Image (cartoon, rainbow, N blue to C red):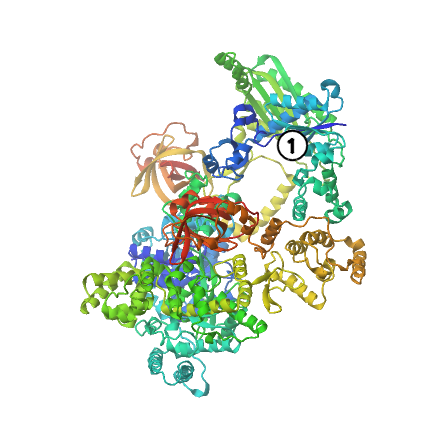
Amino acid sequence: MVQAVLRAEDEVRDNVELRADGELLEKTVALVDGTAPLIHVVAANEAAWRAGIQLGMAQTQAQLCGVEIRRRSPGLEKAAHAALLDLGWSMSPRVEDHAEDTILADLAGLNSLFGAEENIAREFARRAAELNLRVRVAVSANLEVAVHAARGFAGITVIPEGEEARYLSGLPVQTLAPSAEALETLERWGIRTCAALGALPMQELSERLGQEGVRLQELARGAHARSLVLAEPPEILEEEMELDDAVGDLEPLAFVLGRLLDQVCARLATRALSAAAIRVRFDLGDAFEKEEQVRGKNPVTVATAAAKTYEKVLNLPVPMRDSKMLLKLLRLQLQADPPPGAIVKITLGADPARPRSTQHGLFVPNSPDPEKLELTVARLAKLVGGANIGSPELTDTHRPGEFRMNKFFAQPNETRARGKAGKKFASGGEAVARRPATGCRIFRPRLAARVELREGRPAKICFRGLYGRVVTASGPWRISGDWWREDAWQQEEWDLEIAFEGGGASVPVNVPGNVHAIGPVPDAKACARAGLYCVYYDGACRSWFVRGTYD
Amino acid sequence: MYTELHARSAFSFLEGASLPEELAERCAERGMAAMALLDRDGVYGAPRFYLAAKKISMRAHIGAEVTSAEGWRFPLLVETRAGYQNLCQLITRMKLRARKGEGQVSYEEVGGKAAGLICLTGGKEGPLAHALGRGGVESGTTCVRQLGEIFGRDNVYVELQRHFDRAEEARNHAAVEIARKLGLPLLATNGVCYAQPERREVLDVFTCLRHHRTLETAGRLLGRNSERYLKSPEEMTRLFADLPEAIAHTQLVSARLQFDLQDLGYEFPRYPVPDGKSQAYFLRERTMEGMIHRYGFQNEKARAQIEKELGMIERLGLEGYFLIVWDIIRFCRERNILVQGRGSAANSAVCYALRITAVDPVGMDLLFERFLSEERGEWPDIDLDLPSGDQRESAIQYVYERYGKLGAAMTANVITYRGKSAAREIGKALSFNSETLDRLTSLVSAWEYKSENDTLARHFKDAGLDLQHPQIRKFLELCVQFQDLPRHLGQHSGGMVVCQGQLDSVVPLEPATMPGRVVVQWDKEDCADMGIVKVDLLGLGMMAVLEESLEIIRDNYGEEIDLGRLPADDPVVYETLRRADTVGMFQIESRAQMSCLPRLRPVHFYDIVVQVAIIRPGPIVGKMVNPYLKRRQGREPATCLHPSLEPVLARTLGVPLFQEQLLRMAMIAAGFTGGEAEELRRAMGFKRSEKRMKDIEQKLRRGMEKKGITGEVQDTIVQSITSFALYGFPESHAASFALLAYASAYLKCHYLAAFTAAMLNNQPMGFYSPATLVKDAQRHGLRIRPIDVTCSDWLCKIEKQGEELSVRLGMRYVRGLRAEIAEEIVRERNARAFGSLDDLKLRVPAIRKVELTALAEIGALNFIGGGRGSHRRDALWQVERAARSAGPLLEKYDQEEHVVGEQGAADTTAIVNSPLQQMTPEERLVADFRGTGMTVGPHPMKYHRASMKRQGVLTASELNRLPDGTHVRVAGGVIARQRPGTAKGFVFLSIEDETGIANAIVTPRVFEEHHVTIVHQQFLLIEGQLQHQDNVVSVKVESVEPLSITRAETTSHDFH
């Protein structure tokens, strides 16, 4: 059986961005990666190495070497790898995904189509060139030999059967990818080439390097045999449907989605899997047409239009396979956040996962069914917005009112345990001492206010159309933080007892109206009701706000 | 008027962000007449605070926050000396029983030491806040009542702090209620942690370091706001407008605090003299005995000097001090430990007579006042040099034993944040990843010289970091603020303090990291400032080398050398010095010294004294070097600044070179007394103040005018005194060092093998790496033999073959080999020679594979079992098998097989031949440097000499024969790089080839151009103009290129 190995020429050309820009291949190019403030060189082409580029060099230093700097893109590299695989599959159905930059293909039966091995190799190279990939192609009956030849020799190498050892003899032992420890030992021994390694007495080598030594020697002699590990096309649990007419309403869309979900769930069922997430991509017709109008028949238009998609990901609390339930969830999500235009194509995929397996205890109270709970949460999210539902958690900061929303999960056992701990805690003296004297209802969002100061203390206040006179003021309470970040903040809080003009409500949340300038202060007697408020001056935006009201 | 009575400095280690001096300064700026420093569990910053306050006529109250067993802290203020002693003892007790940096006290312990202390109820970390948090007002009342019982009702103040924090204000309400209920006074403080509000950022970073968090994850551990700064009395009065009595009480408390650090009550121990004699009498007896030994009976000059010194010693009551130092010297001599006093003690004839020092101050006409004067009112400073290592430790332990655990302690060494340490810590707090951290810290330049462009900002830019990035900007700002802030307390290498009574009453003691060591909370400068006598027992590598050399000479040459009786004017030594052939010699081996020696051309011992002192910042900055050398060579007349100064300057040809000369100049020209002159030196010292310098300068000028010295001459004298006093080297110190320099030169010239072995056994020390020392010795004809497990010991040793002596390298140079394994190898080998490598592995079972590999790779296993013809790769081949465990099943079989082999079967030849190729010379070179950091084989350059010749590259020795101005090319391995602060950005390179060392001078322009090559490349090819003047040869570099001649990792000793 004859195998061919295709290996991308080097790391830089592995990058699709560069493949797309043919001219760059002829230039000195370095790829950089990292996050600011540290961006450094992660790869470069031969010309760039010659220009003095070194791995790990900072971007600005690399620029001084006069090379073209390109940002590394893992996504594009992945695409290059996929292109390499596609290239393999375009010629042979039996392909091994050997490494990021290397694939193996079985050439059995290709002679009748392309002729001799050399012709097949050339065909590989030609097709690769069409994809703007420069590849090394090595053909050998022994697939490991082919791999090593592709690592060691540029261009096309066809190794006749029986000549493997001779071909490999001059290659450095690093080509065989030994472990770091073995490589260090070989280096100490002065064993640098495959020929030298192949010449060592096998038994004595095995006494010293163990099984790895034997394997490496077999590799060096071109005698290590193994079979191809076939790459399977990715687990595509994806269904797509192009629509004859663009659909703008949710109802007909739900019908199509339902069908697609049925198909996906059926496929999941055949594999005894469930979905951990559902991904939907909508190709938007409006956007496409708009682009067409603007750019006419320019080929760029197609790419641009193709990018006009709208995606939704439905992350599930537990793996599910109930297409009806999934459709409900998807509908709720789309209702809360509908696509911006009419849809011409739907691609629906599922992330496969093992189904949930739970064992209920006899004495454990029933907890809500996760699927139903998720549905309820989704309905609420539709009402209040996705970012406003979940389990709030205070963040560890001095910044008042800071919290984050965690996804809501019902964990009955944990809840019970926490309840017990809570009781225990409550009985402790510390807890009693720390119990807040009063509650504070926070306005979200904060209310803008205008405050008049007298001797540095708030005297009058106006917010949401209410005017008030400060009866008593306690403060200021100064807080500041995050000074190392761009969004450093500082606030000066006051606890105010405010008497409102005209007997306004003490909790003015529902009072509509704009903020007005402070008017004449009403007589104290006219203030039928007063309230306790937390008001603060935000040093960053130099404005006053009402944070909340005390019970 | 308000007085701040609760402030922490950066000596609260990570809980305060300003130095005590900054707090004192700020306090004065804000118009406060007094302030109290309460650092956490110590009085670490008290001396600096006290001295800074004294300078600005401010009162410095002392106290501490002492950690209780419950975790909160007693804020204690010292009212009286008894209170201070109680506080010191309390802290000592808690510290000595806990691990370093920890410790706590119980109520009972505090109760026992409460006299003379005032207790505050504290802020957030205090007892009251803790009690309120635990059980509200009721618990708080009990707590305050309890404090009243311990300290007395009059000595407890209910403390109020206002940092604009609700929870704190709630506590304040409770505190006021409790104070009213118990009838106790209120006291306002600000719980200060930093001098200015901006320093809150530093404190936040410290908080992160303390809790091992980053700023992003520290959350509410960080400060709520920036209010813990030192507020002005007006601000505090406004803050406590509702409680004016709390402000008023600060004044009352301040008035009560009568103690200050002037009143320490320190007393130096009395030496136990026999038979009821007085200390003065006993000292006189010992001194006179010594005088006869040193000077004989007839030396009247010496007798008069000694009488004068003894008189002063008695007047100052220092007999005990001299006797104690004499006692340490006696202990060392009895145990054959080399010891020599250095520093200004060498100016004293009494010290010379007591054999504390080895320099004759009478013969050399040294100035006693530099050592001791009545005006100064300070303790003298005697530094003793001892061989570094165990012998110095035994001297230290002797002092501990003699004066008891609470009577003697080491001085502390305050480790402060410097460039790299600050950058690393700040980077961590800012969440930089380790890669970024490495990169950032590597950017902090370590060269001594910094050019104008050599700023952190520029380095950051060069490294590709965006200075506009907020985090990088903040990083830079913080790096600057962190400089010099204390990081932790270390132990000084040799400074010891002793005390007559309990040392723990004078300063708190702490356990040091080293077991059995106790350290005081002050560093040696603080101790000196507080008038505590210290004796420095310093470890000096060269003393160890000399001592070991003498031992080796005794054992291998059969000669007994007495360093005190070396031939004074050995011609070989001086000839060697004149050739600047001084690699390895004490103090005269550096590149700068080498380039000066041929010009100075030493002929007598005093020339070496000058040589030691001349290459120092003082003479260089004061531009004294060239005039002196020109006069020495007769190119310039040896005129004097003024005829009256001739007796002082004559022996240095009219050029002032030593500190003593400057003091004498002031004494002669301006009529200063000895003490005033020493005062002048100190005024010019490191902590110089403009005002003090101006005063002294005026005094100098007035004095000179009285003596008729005016105009230009006066200006020149003033100029030379003021510019030189800071960096000048004391003549006595130079003389002590010159003795060691001469001794090392003598031993190197006459006992090269012994000296080399001793040098190699005491590394790291000196200017050059072991690789350079080995090459130098080889060039001088000494054979250095490689490491060989069949004959090498752990240390290097001498081997004799017929008459020829050679040095056998010791296994200490095998990288990665543990000392205990080497010693086991030696033990087993001495019992019975190793038959084979398997035999070695079997008899030294603890040896690891990496250790065997390291030995094999450097050829140390080649001769096992007398294995001739085997090479390093044979050993490596066999090591892989020997080191691979046979597994439990076959282990027994393996051992049996080995025993059979050992008893006479085919396996007796140690290393079997392998299928591997012998190492090439280059591979051996790489292996040698990788495994030992050196090679005993040819220098790497030797392998390339032919091709070098073809390229017109000269050897280092060939340069000596070429005339000045020749355009040359030279190449070699860089062994030293220097960019001294005094050299205006010039870089000096020492380049070694197989014939010797060539010196190269790189101008700032060339350095800028070839920065990376010069700093990072191991081998260089240099082209430039030869400078050959007065037998000093160097190449002024015009171009530099890297040379790829070997992969061996040679090292350079770079001085940054």
Is A94 left or right of B329, judged from the image as shown? right
Residue A362 x %, y %? 73, 40
Is B652 left or right of A5, judged from the image as shown? left
In this picture, is A299 found above or below A193? above
Q: Nearer the viewer, residue B893 or B116?
A: B893
Other-residue count near label 1 (Cα within 10 Å), few / some / many at <14 / 14–19 / ≥20 = some
Residue A116 x %, y %? 73, 22
Residue B31 x %, y %? 28, 56
Q: Nearer the viewer, residue A309 or A146?
A: A146
In this picture, is B296 found above or below B77? below
Residue behind mark 1: A153
Q: Nearer the viewer, residue A256 or B394?
A: B394
Residue A92 x %, y %? 71, 23
Q: Is residue A275 visible?
A: yes
Query: What kind of element bears circle 1?
Result: loop
Q: Is residue B521 visible?
A: no
In this picture, is A190 found above or below B996? above
Is B667 left or right of B275, judged from the image as shown? left
Disc 1: host chain = A
Extreme residue toward the bottom, this view: B275
In this picture, is B635 found above or below B367? above
Q: Which quarter of the rendered picture does the N terminus of chain B lie within?
A: bottom left
Q: The residue under label 1 is which amino acid type?
A: Phe
The mark total stands at 1
